[in-house]
Amino acid sequence: MAETVIKCENVYKIFGSNAKKMLQESNGNVDAKTFQKNGCIVGVNNASFEVSKGEMLVVMGLSGSGKSTLLRCISRLTDATGGKIFIEGQDLLQLNNKELIELRRNKMGMVFQSFALLPHKTVVENIAFPLQIKGVKTEDSISKAMDMVKLVGLDGRENYFPRELSGGQQQRVGIARSLAVEPDIWFLDEPFSALDPLIRKEMQDEFLRLQEKLQKTIMFITHDFDEALKLADRIAIMKDGIIEQLDTPANIVLNPATEYVRKFTEEVPREKVLLIEDVMDASKNDLGDLKVFKDEIIENVAEKILTQEKAVAVIDSKNEIVGSINPTKIINTVFGGRKNNN
């Protein structure tokens, strides 16, 4: 079983002068409207979950849902009002300032929507900067920064200043800078939302490539459902500070836990999200000649399956048959989950 890196137990973040007192009196049953009447705003309401080593958990929700506040609590940029947060077994809320700075410098990387690059420093100097703060020798920090330049595909631009770069290139510098300190845990808060759609897609592809190579433990915040589906191992959907559902992208689309999640997902093109194994049958009888891999996205093989008269064999990585899929199942999956507009 994968090692737990981040663990939250009943985490609350409530803004307001009497927040702690009200939370104690509520016995954990926090009603946002009641708190609001008493001058408190509920940012995070009873969040409990774990993130495993190498997992990418995408937290999403509309503006004001509490997703950024949750991330700020876990990185302790803001202090939680109640609950417990553990990073690799360490109780985050019990750390003193010195221990917290040490943890952030050595374990955590952060990337935010604003790139926050130093305008008077070049690309390579911006990337080397956090290493120099840690006390790494200038020569070593520049060498490491050059490795990062190559990793994010900015070769040839290492001596440019931020003003000479496009938005997408600036974001790459921000990502390279946070990776330079080799964090085990990576927090990203809407890092691509300021970019135009084409660059955004390129950055998502680049990000997936990096993650495949580096296997970081990641919490990624977005309000874009397509982005979440593309990147996530699991997705947490938040509303009014509450995690409505935390599950795999396929389960969230196929089995929404609440009416809010159902509305959130009803327009999602299922064929872009679901894998063959999510909808295959256990039967292995009366199969045609075509075979498809169980981890194929439906969209990529739907056309081939729809040309078959018989059920199609579903195989695993060892080419062993693990089930079957019928052309009618593809039709029902693609069109059956859509909102009926009649």
Image (spheres, helix red, strand yellow):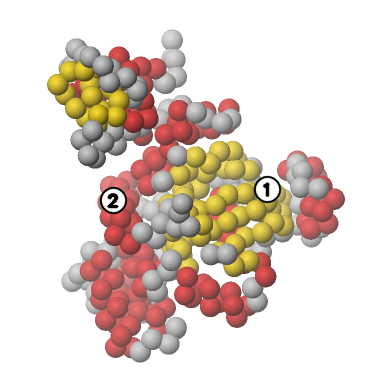
Give the percent coordinates (x, y) of residue 113: 44, 58
Res 318 quadrant in image: top left
Q: Which mark is residue 46?
A: 1
Identify the element where label 2 is drawn: helix
- Which residue occupies 26% across, 36% down? 316
Give the percent coordinates (x, y) of residue 136: 38, 86
Disc 2 marks a residue whose amino acid type is: Asp
| Residue under numbered circle 2 | 205
Identify the element where label 1 is drawn: strand
Disc 1 marks a residue whose amino acid type is: Asn
Crowding at dot 1, Cα within 10 Å, few <14 / some 14-19 / many 20+, comes out as some
In the depicted view, which residue is nearer to us: 281 or 191? 281
Residue 113 in sight: no
Give the percent coordinates (x, y) of residue 209: 28, 55
- Which residue occupies 32% across, 19% down? 283
Quadrant occupied by the C terminus: top left
Q: Which mark is residue 145?
A: none
Indicate which label's residue lies in the foreground, 2 or 1.
1
Residue 237 falls left or right of residue 193: right
Give the percent coordinates (x, y) of residue 195: 35, 53
- Which residue occupies 30% across, 14% down? 328
Vertical position of residue 187 compared to residue 311: above or below? below
- Which residue occupies 44% across, 62% down? 186
In the depicted view, which residue is nearer to us: 285 or 38? 285
